[in-house]
Image: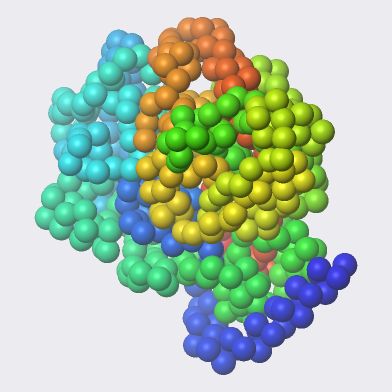
Amino acid sequence: MNAIRKSIMGWSRCAVLVGGALTALAAHANKANDTLVYASDSEVENISQYHNNLREGVILAHLIWDTLIYRDPKTNEYKPQLATAWKWESPTALVLDLRQGVQFQNGDKFSADDVVFTFNYAVSPESKAVTRQNTDWIKSVDKLGDYKVRINLKGPFPAALEYLAGPLPIYPAAYFKKVGLEGFSKAPIGTGPYKVTSVTPGQGVTLVKNTNYFKDSPQGQPSIGNIKFVVIPDPETRAAQLMTGAIDWIWRVPPDQADSLKTNPKLAVQSGETMRVGFITLDVTGSSAPNSPFKDVRVRQAVNYAINRKGYADNLMRGGSQPVYTACFRTQFGCDSNAAIKYDYNPAKAKELLAAAGYPNGFDTDIYAYREREIAEAIIGDLRKVGIRARLHYMKFAALQTEYRSGKTPMSFYSWGSFSMNDTSAFAGVYFKGSADDITKDPQLQQYLQTADTSIDPAVRKANYSKALELISKQAYIAPMFSYSTYYAYNAQLKFQGYPDELPRFYEASWK
């Protein structure tokens, strides 16, 4: 209760301090001006979907661009979007018929040339794409006609349709070639329901409804006329701006804030479990230091026993969060929860393992984080109880990812939402299959995942995912902790529905 009272006082102070500065912004928000202003804590450094890993980038991508296939979030049924039909020519060749009569937001006509360019560019070294795990299965794309393409796969990949319905938007070939990646990131063009009118570094992105959006889109026509994404790193400031009416929608609201915001009749609060999983990475290979304690499996297991998963889920995340023990989310195809060790909260066992590994008095180390500082601090507190004294390095995601991929982080607090894809390949395949994010470099594990990702037999896929998840758990390559719950707080005049895939679909939103 004291924490809630302090938060309310903090928001009140924020509201007073920023009130004058927000007057102009507030005048452009809300139903009267048909402008939805939403805020988040992280800035997308490059708005291109192939060049950022942030959830904020995924949200913007679904507003600006379309994909070939659409997965209905209510039924999980695949529906035609930019492709009207598809057929497997062979296990490694998918032929798609494309929709005619679709225009990009600059007036260019959509055709096979755009699909061929987008995917061939994305898989090429010169693209410098940072989401290669999403396109690694694509060998090349051929044009079979003005509205027909063939996607050639490197090998069988049963999850292809799931990926085509997810993080693989189609770009305008002619425009992209003209402006290049840098120009495209500043003034992106797509076929999606909203068109970008400005990208302002450090501030956000402004969009306007695409009045020429194609009528047969399975996701329907957008309702709200204008959308503005603003970057506000501080959670108290976000809450204060929501209360003053300067912004209309925020998420990742701390539970105590959410409880208090529910009492405001001008606001609505919604919550639920999401596919996002919070976990701790561990320096398995000792790249951060030659004598890294985390090279010893007993130390990694000690970390797993030291963290209070249920405590984090019940007391810090709340809203439907659950403990997680696997490198996947339970609804994803192949996510076998029974394959993993369910490390209970057992500080005594953790101390015993540390002593057996030669650290009876614990050791000093570093932990890196980029979000939910209170969670990072709770982790540090639990580790300290068993003798692991971790110093926190809190930074932006891009900086942390650079340090992590360079092998400089002994421990890091990460989260992963699998790009909202309902397949274990979208999680385990990213962190354990040899990519830049795989710091374990376990060849046996990579083989299990390769077989699971490419077999056309569902039983073989499941069996190999189970083997992989069991190996990850026994070796304690990471410490999975909990599923995220997300609290949304928004203008009560807004009609909004959240989904477990953690993808706010603002093109579905409308004013009451």
Q: In the image shown, does 298 or 49 lie closer to the viewer? A: 298
Q: Is residue 389 visible?
A: yes
Counting from the top left corner in percent of width and height, residue 70 is at 44, 37
Q: Residue at x 40, y 67 (%)?
A: 205
Q: Residue at x 66, y 84 (%)?
A: 15
- Compare residues 497 and 138 and report the one nearer the observer: 138
Q: Quadrant of the C terminus?
A: bottom right
Kindly indicate the quadrant of the structure image that contains residue 186. bottom left
Residue placed at 37% from the left, 31% from the top?
A: 435
Compared to residue 219, the image places residue 450 above or below, namely above
Please report the residue visible at 53 percent of the width from the left and 77 percent of the height from the top: 29
Q: Is residue 185 above or below residue 276?
A: below
Quarter assignment of residue 388: top right
Decide if residue 428 is on the left or right side of residue 486.
left
Number of numbered discs: 0
Instruction: Please name the colour scheme applied to the rendered image.
Output: rainbow
Q: Residue furthest right?
A: 1
Q: Quadrant of the N terminus?
A: bottom right
Residue 372 x, y percent position in the rendering: 62, 56
Frontmost residue, 324 versus 454: 324
Above or below for 456 versus 130: above
- Relative horizontal placement of residue 175, taking residue 414 as reference (left or right): left
Viewer-side residue, 52 vs 186: 52
Q: Give percent across and percent down for residue 400.
A: 45, 51
Q: Is residue 315 left or right of residue 331?
A: right
Q: Picture quarter containing residue 434? A: top left
Residue 252 seen in render: no
